[in-house]
Amino acid sequence: MTIYVAEEWKDFFVAAAGASAALAGLIIVAMSVNINQILKFRHLPPRAAAAIGTLILILVSSMAGLMHQSATALGAELLLFGACAWVMQLKSHRQAFAVGKEFQRPAWESLLEAGVGQVQTVPFVVAGALLLTGNGSGVYWLAGGVIAIFIFSTMNAWVLLVEILR
């Protein structure tokens, strides 16, 4: 039996798509306003790119969730989208660790940043794998990932808009 998830989750996907697009726009504006400051710190451009990437992850995942397709197809898409965003996060983490060592930042700062990135992207990979295997609980992992991204992307927006000017 083919399971479709769009009806039960339609309102969630619509809200997530709209909110993620708005927040991605805010981060892009923050980057354009503070681009000179952001470019002074080698770890901030990849962090900003990862923040935008995770919000786009929500946008494309929500759009996929709104399509009339099987949970298995949605799972494959989430797995692909999540893996791409995860790789982007890993690149950002690598840069943060390198800069952290160079400027003798406490190791916990880079570890925290890496952990936060994983909390945002891994749920999408897990959601995709679960849905791909027919386990409907994958949608709850997706919801958890969406919520985590909203929390931490707001924090990244704050860093790029305000903290960078201190």
Image (cartoon, grey):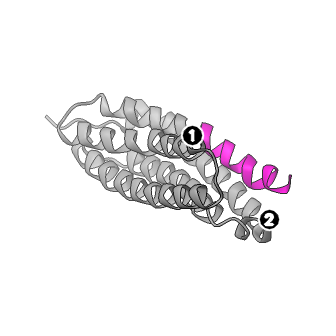
Q: What residue type is labelled 1?
A: Trp
Query: Is 92 colored magenta in this rendering?
Result: no
The circle drawn on residue 37 is none
Residue identifier under label 2: 34
Q: Along the line of sight, which residue is nearer the eye, 67 or 123?
A: 123
Q: Looking at the image, do the residues carrying marks 1 and 2 touch, with CB atoms under 8 Å apart?
A: no
Q: What stretch is highlighted in magenta?
A: 150-166
Classify residue 28 as left or right of residue 127. Answer: right
Q: Quadrant of the N terminus?
A: top left
Nearer the observer: mark 1 or 2; the answer is: 1
Quarter where residue 133 is shown: top left
**Percent from the top left, x then y, of residue 33?**
81, 65
Q: Along the line of sight, which residue is nearer the eye, 83 or 164?
A: 164
Q: Is mark 1 on a helix, strand or loop?
A: helix
Residue at position x 71%, y 70% in the image: 39
Q: Residue furthest right?
A: 166
**Percent from the top left, x then y, of residue 67?**
37, 49
Residue at position x 21%, y 43% in the image: 132
Residue identifier under label 1: 108
Prevalent SS, magenta region = helix
**Percent from the top left, x then y, of residue 113?**
56, 45
Residue at position x 52%, y 55% in the image: 97
Q: In this view, does 1 lie above or below 42?
A: above
Count residues near mark 2 (Cα–Cα under 10 Å), then give few for <14, some for 14-19, many for 20+: some
Which of the two discs, 1 and 2, labels the residue nearer the N terminus? 2
Q: Which amino acid does label 2 sit on?
A: Asn
Query: Is 162 colored magenta in this rendering?
Result: yes
**Percent from the top left, x then y, of residue 129?**
24, 42
Residue at position x 39%, y 58% in the image: 87
Between the C-alphas of marks 1 and 2, the distance is 26 Å
Count residues near mark 1 (Cα–Cα under 10 Å), then give few for <14, some for 14-19, many for 20+: few
Q: Is mark 2 on a helix, strand or loop?
A: loop
